[in-house]
Amino acid sequence: MDFEKPEDLFGRADDFMRGAEKKIKGVKTIVPLLIFILLVIAALFNSFYSVGPDEVGVIRRFGRYVRSTNPGLHFKIPFIEEANRVKVKYIFKEEFGFRTQKAGVVTRYSPRDYFDESLMLTGDLNVLEVEWIVQFKVKDPVKLLFNIRNPRDTIRNISEAVMRQVVGDNTVNEILTTRRVEVNQEVELKLQQILDSYDSGVQIVTVKLQDVNPPDAVKPSFNEVNEAKQEKEKVINQAWEGYNRIIPQARGGAEKTIREAEGYALNRINRAQGDAAKFIETYNTYRNAKDITRTRLYLEVMNEIIPKVGKKFIIDSQQKGILPLLNLNEKKGE
């Protein structure tokens, strides 16, 4: 740089410093304006929020609940109020003992690496692998946010504890066959009672057992025991079938014989009583009118005998010979 004397150098330095000072003052004027603009933009973005159709907005002011909002676009005080969106119509699902990798036409499950969740001890000291699902929804978003911490982990821990308790109160055959529906209902009821005691704002929709099987290591022995039990039940059922076929038949025959004997005895008694009453009545009549009674009895006897006689011959009492009157060659029945 060309200059004629040292004063020119210092003069140019002064000019440079004055120019730099003016630029710095200009920057100091622009920076606050930029900061203000950025704050206004951030406040605008932070002032409005939207709530989905299946959600409820929970507004907190310095962490304290102030109001709830319905689906739509809403305003809140920026940097002071915070909005939490909680799905209240969505059905959440938790899986135990397995995890779904991909749901579609054919649901694929991840490898069974969740034995810590699924291995359980039954009431008769057998071991089972129990897989189940829990479906729930939020019925009170305020209670969900303020009364429990980590809702998902809380629900999973309670569900596993309740399922282990219910499985431990039943035998292996009941869990596998006869009481599966009752187990679902019992777990659902107890789980809901515990969540209500926590005032969690969560409603259990359903609890359903999926696969329940013995561990792979004991399946052969378990199957042999089941086959022996089935064979035992088969023999018992066959014995009961024979018993139910023979015993009722014998009881029916005995009952029939008893009823026939009772009927015969009653008939004989009634006939004897009737004959005795008839004899007494006839005797009393005979004492009052002997000739008439005798004649009536004779006529009644003849009335019974004569119809049984094939041919009848009425002859004079003075007749000496009756053979010419009889056709002895007449064939019987002519």
Image (spheres, grey):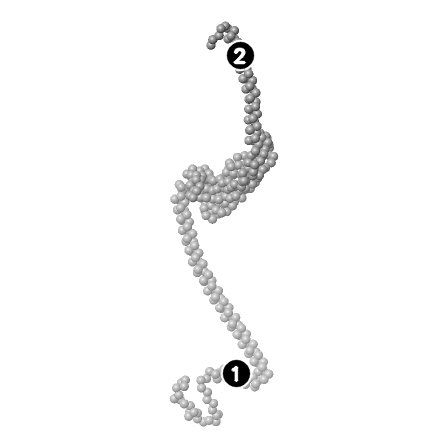
The quadrant holding residue 99 is top left
Residue under the image location 46 percent in, 82 percent down: 308
Q: Position of residue 101 (x, y in %)?
A: 43, 39
Residue 281 in view of the camera: yes
Q: Position of residue 167 (x, y in %)?
A: 48, 43
Residue 215 or residue 40, whichever sits in front: 40
Residue under the image location 47 percent in, 42 percent down: 132
Amino acid carrying mark 2 in the image: Asp
Q: Position of residue 275 (x, y in %)?
A: 54, 76
CA distance separating discs 2 and 1 = 173 Å
Residue under the image location 54 percent in, 19 percent down: 27
Residue 202 in view of the camera: no
Return the disc, 2 or 1, that comes first in the chain's sequence.
2
Q: What residue did someone put label 1 on?
A: 300
Residue 311 or residue 10, whichever sits in front: 10
Q: What residue did someone put label 2 on?
A: 15
Vertical relation: 219 (above or below) 266:
above
Q: Of helix, strand and loop, which one carries label 1? A: helix
Q: Nearer the viewer, mark 2 or mark 1?
A: 2
Residue 192 or residue 139, whichever sits in front: 139
Residue under the image location 53 percent in, 14 percent down: 19
Vertical relation: 320 (above or below) 194:
below
Q: Residue furthest right?
A: 66
The quadrant holding residue 322 is bottom left
**Quadrant occupied by the C terminus:** bottom left
Q: Label 1 crowding class (10 Å Cα cut-off): few <14, some 14-19, many 20+?
A: few
Q: Label 2 crowding class (10 Å Cα cut-off): few <14, some 14-19, many 20+?
A: few
Q: Position of residue 40 (x, y in %)?
A: 57, 28
Vertical relation: 289 (above or below) 182:
below
Amino acid carrying mark 1 in the image: Glu
Residue 148 or residue 170, whichever sits in front: 148
